[in-house]
Image (cartoon, helix red, strand yellow):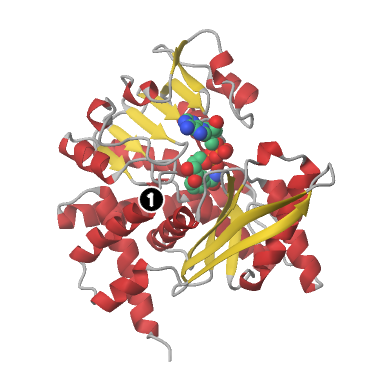
Amino acid sequence: MTTNVLQMARDQLAIAVKYLDIDPGLHQVLNFPKRQITVHFPVVLDDGSIRVFEGYRVQHNSSRGPTKGGIRYHPDVDLDDTTALAMWMTWKCAVANIPYGGAKGSVKVDPKELSIRELEKMTRRFVTEINIILGERTDIPAPDIGTNGQVMAWIMDTFSMQQGYTVPGVVTGKPIELGGSEGRIEATGRGVVVSAEEAAKVINLNLAGARIVVQGFGNVGSIAARLIEEAGATVVAVSDALGGVYNPKGLPVSELCRRYSGRDGGVQEHKDAERVTNKEILELPCDVLIPAAISAQITGENAGKVKAKLVVEGANGPCTIEADHILSDRGVFVVPDIVANAGGVVVSYFEWVQDLQNFFWDENEVNRRLERIMKNSFATVESTMRAHKTDMRTAAYIIGVKRVADATKTRGIFP
Ligand code: NAD
């Protein structure tokens, strides 16, 4: 991440505040996280040496409910990035209208450098260091970059061992057999595609036959690519951390998913296509661009070269504020991250509800409820966009910030 991501999140909040009659003191409440923990903790590695890791858990705002947000394992994370991500979670949950505030956690580590045993030990020790602020009624982690269902299972087990009974609702994104939800793995990609379908109707784009470019071929990107192809579109380019492939006639998405998703890199091994860099892929001729990798990919430098009519943000923060202005001036319709990629947290919410009730739903029910929430929040954001004559991102912030500000104000400032 770039070091100014927190400033970007604060600037986005300031833009929304201008549209709303928010007291300056309340603006400050929203501008800062409620709670930040930085921990340094040792782990004995397989060779017997001790390594000290740095990790964070940030809770931004809990006025609307327990805080919720993923845990990221990545060498470039820091406290500011984690805080920005926690803020985005607050607005995202509010826009989807689910009863959560925002949080995020991270550990500065490349998980690929660790053995499975080291990864497990590091996860269990990290959870132990931050468990004073976790809980199924207080703060509920989920997977993010570098973490997965297995890591969530270790978090659940560690927390449960310390409580003395099983607490499945303390974390979401768990394997199904431990109280995970049907449809959770696909949820973010599925929500991205529902958003793309709704946006295509607004700009009169027929998705059947539309050309799609997807940057990032992990959980979000590969599933969005597969589902948008099922909706009749043609995926012409995909990429992972090592680079991408482009074929204007279309790529065999199912085969690419089978061979490369879940692996960190490799799509360029696909032969029947031209190789492109992660910079070039954003500028390819296409109708819909889905950035689904990392933040700050579309910037003031390359936004003028984006050819897509529609950008659907699978990743968190892929467009900078400068890029937003350029895309908006050029008439490119952008579905912002806090709308487009909310499917993951929505199905995490379903998982938590099912865990608390010990009553589990089938996949059709999960997908049907997910689609309904995604469509409702898209429609609310679109009508706010029209009412305020603004763009989708500003409209989403207006809704999210207003809901959180109203909840904070109505609860009152304690004591
Ligand atoms: P992932 O780790 O499964 O996949 C990330 C993909 O991006 C991989 O293909 C990786 O090779 C690629 N990548 C990494 N660095 C890259 C670079 N510099 N350029 C291009 N590609 C690069 O992660 P994910 O869960 O798919 O998350 C992707 C994005 O979506 C992240 O921004 C994440 O915060 C966001 N997100 C994920 C979820 C979720 O439920 N998984 C929910 C909301 C938002």
- The answer to which of 205 and 73 lies nearer the viewer is 73
Whether residue 350 is visible, yes or no, is no
Residue 93 in the figure: left or right of residue 410: right
Quadrant that contains the C terminus:
bottom left
Q: Residues within 10 Å of mark 1 (few under 14, many from 20)?
A: many
Residue 32 in the figure: left or right of residue 265: left
Residue 261 at x, y = what percent? 60, 29
Q: Residue at x 40, y 83 (%)?
A: 411
- Where does label 1 land, which residue? 5
Residue 23 in the image: above or below residue 298: below
Q: Residue at x 30, y 68 (%)?
A: 402
Regarding mark 1 in the picture, which secondary structure is present there? helix
Whether residue 29 is visible, yes or no, is yes
- Residue type beneath disc 1: Val
Q: Quadrant of residue 361?
A: bottom right
Quadrant that contains the N terminus:
top left
Residue 30 at x, y = what percent? 35, 69
- The answer to which of 88 and 388 lies nearer the viewer is 88
- The answer to which of 193 and 396 lies nearer the viewer is 396
Q: Residue at x 24, y 42 (%)?
A: 322
Residue 19 in the figure: left or right of residue 415: left
